Image (cartoon, helix red, strand yellow):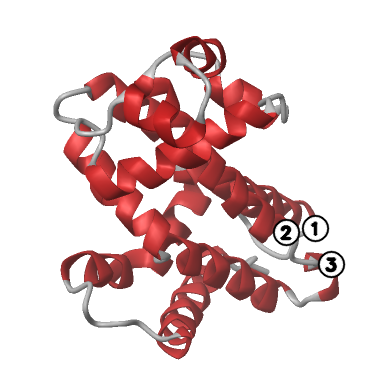
């Protein structure tokens, strides 16, 4: 399966990008099982060979769809100019953008799709766990490492701290949008939840003197 590597290195051909776009649209419209390679080819053009060469198979296409969203999320968070912000403000902005992304129509739909796919294809679940949304928070892990190196926070395990912060900030909001999709969650509600979670996180990891 070469899909993720090609996306990371920006090596997808123009045809490959068309196939990826079509696959995401059709997966979300019809589901993974109900979307055939013929449907994707009909929408994007190309051939089965085009798909096999760039993505390996339909599972590779699904992984590529997810990985592309992870890269979008990572880029959004990495674009924050943390050096121009106080640590508390930088963390709140990074977490707000993460939660906002997680609650987008695309990622919520992908989450539901993956839940349906994993029981039939557990190997896909394992790959998503290793290379999925938490990878998108690499900029946060690196920022926490910087705060530790500067003595602003005391963090012995930045990756674990990242995972805990992510669970805190998405928490009930992500569950709410999954279970009550008709109830929209405002930016203000996200900000309020994120602000409280980040404040608690900072208290737990504040430097002791």
Q: Residue at x 46, y 90 (%)?
A: 188
Occupied quadrant, residue 58: top left
Badge 3 element: helix
User: On the image, numbered disc 2 is attached to which residue?
Assistant: 147
Q: Position of residue 119 (x, y in %)?
A: 14, 29
Occupied quadrant, residue 115: top left
Task: Say whether disc 2 or disc 3 marks the residue closer to the N-terminus.
Answer: 3
Density class for disc 3 (Cα within 10 Å; few <14, some 14-19, many ≥20) is few
Disc 2/disc 1 C-alpha distance (Å): 5 Å
Disc 1/disc 3 C-alpha distance (Å): 12 Å
User: On the image, numbered disc 3 is attached to which residue?
Assistant: 83
Horizontal relation, residue 4 to residue 107: left or right: right
Q: Residue at x 54, y 45 (%)?
A: 70
Q: Vertically, is 64 above or below 183? A: above
Q: Position of residue 67 (x, y in %)?
A: 51, 37
Is the C terminus in the top left, top right, bottom left or bottom right quadrant?
bottom right
User: On the image, numbered disc 1 is attached to which residue?
Assistant: 150
Q: Residue at x 63, y 54 (%)?
A: 140
Q: Position of residue 25 (x, y in %)?
A: 40, 46
Find out whether the residues at labels 1 and 3 contact each other: C-beta distance under 8 Å.
Answer: no
The one of 52 and 122 positioned closer to us in this rendering = 52
Find out whether the residues at labels 2 and 1 contact each other: C-beta distance under 8 Å.
Answer: yes
Q: Residue at x 42, y 68 (%)?
A: 169
Horizontal relation, residue 180 to residue 168: left or right: left
Find out whether the residues at labels 2 and 3 contact each other: C-beta distance under 8 Å.
Answer: no
Which numbered dot is residue 21? none
Density class for disc 1 (Cα within 10 Å; few <14, some 14-19, many ≥20) is few
Badge 2 element: helix
């Amino acid at each position: 399966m070469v899909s993720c590597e090609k996306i990371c290195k920006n090596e997808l051909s123009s045809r490959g990008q068309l196939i990826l776009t079509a696959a995401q649209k059709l997966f979300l419209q019809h589901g993974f099982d109900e979307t055939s390679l013929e449907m994707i080819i009909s929408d994007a053009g190309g051939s089965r060979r085009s798909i096999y060469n760039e993505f390996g198979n339909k599972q590779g296409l699904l992984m590529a769809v997810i990985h592309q969203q992870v890269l979008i999320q990572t880029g959004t968070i990495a674009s924050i100019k943390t050096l121009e912000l106080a640590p508390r403000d930088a963390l709140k902005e990074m977490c707000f953008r993460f939660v906002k992304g997680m609650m987008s129509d695309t990622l919520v739909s992908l989450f539901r799709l993956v839940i349906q796919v994993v029981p039939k294809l557990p190997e896909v679940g394992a790959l998503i766990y290793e290379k999925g949304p938490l990878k998108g928070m690499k900029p946060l892990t690196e920022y926490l490492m910087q705060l530790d190196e500067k003595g602003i926070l005391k963090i012995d395990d930045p990756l674990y701290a990242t995972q805990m912060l992510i669970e805190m900030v998405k928490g009930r909001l992500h569950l709410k949008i999954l279970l009550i999709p008709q109830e929209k969650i405002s930016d203000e509600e996200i900000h309020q939840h994120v602000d409280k979670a980040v404040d608690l996180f900072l208290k737990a990891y504040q430097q002791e003197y």
